Amino acid sequence: MGGELMENYLTKGFLLSLTTAFILLIAILVITANNTYRTATIEEVNQTLQQIQTERQTITWQKIFINNMLISLPLIIPAVGLVPFLSAWINTGAVIGLLAKATGIPPNLYIQNLVILAFPEILAYTVLTAENIYFTILILTRAGAEKRLTTQSWKTLIAYVALLFIGAVTEAVMIAG
């Protein structure tokens, strides 16, 4: 069973897509957060802090889960779905930069901590982004996209939803704590 999983689902191409997606997502956060950290005004920082404090008062794991699902759902559309998701991800990097500036924590350290604390959520985005990239490549190269869709992609969706759920619960606990 394990060998079959590796051969059929975790192909070399998909593993390469996973690695690429993770590096891409972290790189976007690092670049955007550092740029925002350098250029943000005190007014922008204070406005973001005020908005986050307001949202913290009513946040639940369900709201977090639905929000994260809506942000990343476009990724189920090959290639095109990357655009709205990556736009939201860039916005996330900007917010991280603002929070880093507000707390005096360097953006790279802030992101390192997030990668550890929010790992399930980041992994969920990585898995779905990787599936998008890999599936797009299979379509463009005519190398088995239909077979991937009908026999393997559901595994990605299950992993994505499970990881997003774990991430939402973890985030809600951290916010409440």
Image (spheres, grey):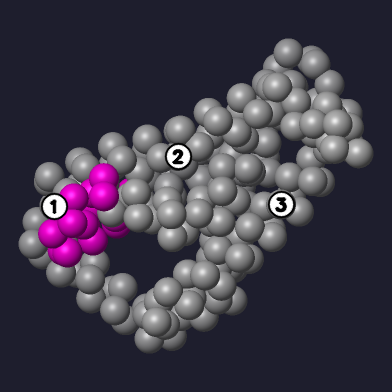
Residue displayed at 37% across by 35% down: 27
Question: 3 or 23, which is in the foreground?
Answer: 3
Instruction: Give the amino acid at mark 1.
Output: Ala
Q: Which residue is mark 1?
A: 40
Dot 3 crowding, Cα within 10 Å, few <14, some 14–19, many 20+: some
Report the Cα–Cα distance between label 2 and label 3: 18 Å
Give the residue type that dot 2 points to: Leu
- The range drawn in magenta is 93-109
Residue 103: quarter of image: bottom left
19, above or below 106, in the image? above
Which picture quadrant has residue 145?
A: top right
Q: Which residue is mark 3?
A: 159
Q: Is residue 140 left or right of residue 147?
A: left
SS type, badge 3: helix
Q: Position of residue 23 (x, y in %)?
A: 46, 33
State the mark number for residue 10. none
As measured in the structure, the alpha-carbon distance from the residue carrying label 3 to the one carrying label 1 is: 36 Å
Q: Is the magenta region chiefly helix, strand or loop? A: helix
